[in-house]
Image (cartoon, rainbow, N blue to C red):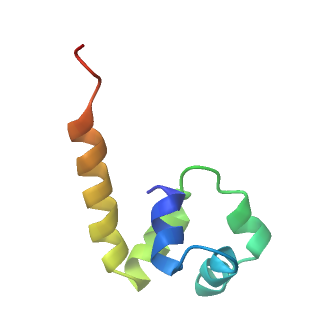
Amino acid sequence: MRTAIVVSYFGPGRGSKARIARSLGVSTAAVAKWGETVPDGSAYQLIRRFPELDRMDKEDWAKSSSSGPSTE
């Protein structure tokens, strides 16, 4: 799951990583270290608590899979 998906779900802008951290019971610093993708354990916890994230992740995966490399 891309971190951008989770941030958009929790509301972009100031404080989004703090809200994510609170929902997982971890520090904001831990969330800030995620990079581009959410660690598997955290992604699992988020999907269990917020099922809508699973749908958003699947839609994102489908978009990135269908765009594929250019054939120009």
Pick whichever, 63 or 48, lies toward us.
63
Q: Quadrant location of the C terminus?
A: top left
Residue 53 occupies quadrant? bottom left
The residue drawn where x is 26% and y is 48% is 63
The residue drawn where x is 75% and y is 74% is 28
For this orientation, the residue located farthest to the top is 72
In percent of width and height, residue 8 lies at 48, 71
In percent of width and height, residue 12 lies at 56, 73
Position of 72 compared to 31: left or right?
left
Pick whichever, 31 or 41, lies toward us.
31
* Count of numbered tags: 0
Above or below, 7 relative to 50 = above
The residue drawn where x is 30% and y is 50% is 61
In percent of width and height, residue 20 lies at 60, 78
Q: Quadrant location of the N terminus?
A: bottom left
Above or below, 21 relative to 61 = below
In percent of width and height, residue 48 lies at 39, 80
For this orientation, the residue located farthest to the front is 72
The residue drawn where x is 63% and y is 84% is 19
Pick whichever, 48 or 31, lies toward us.
31
Position of 31 compared to 4: left or right?
right
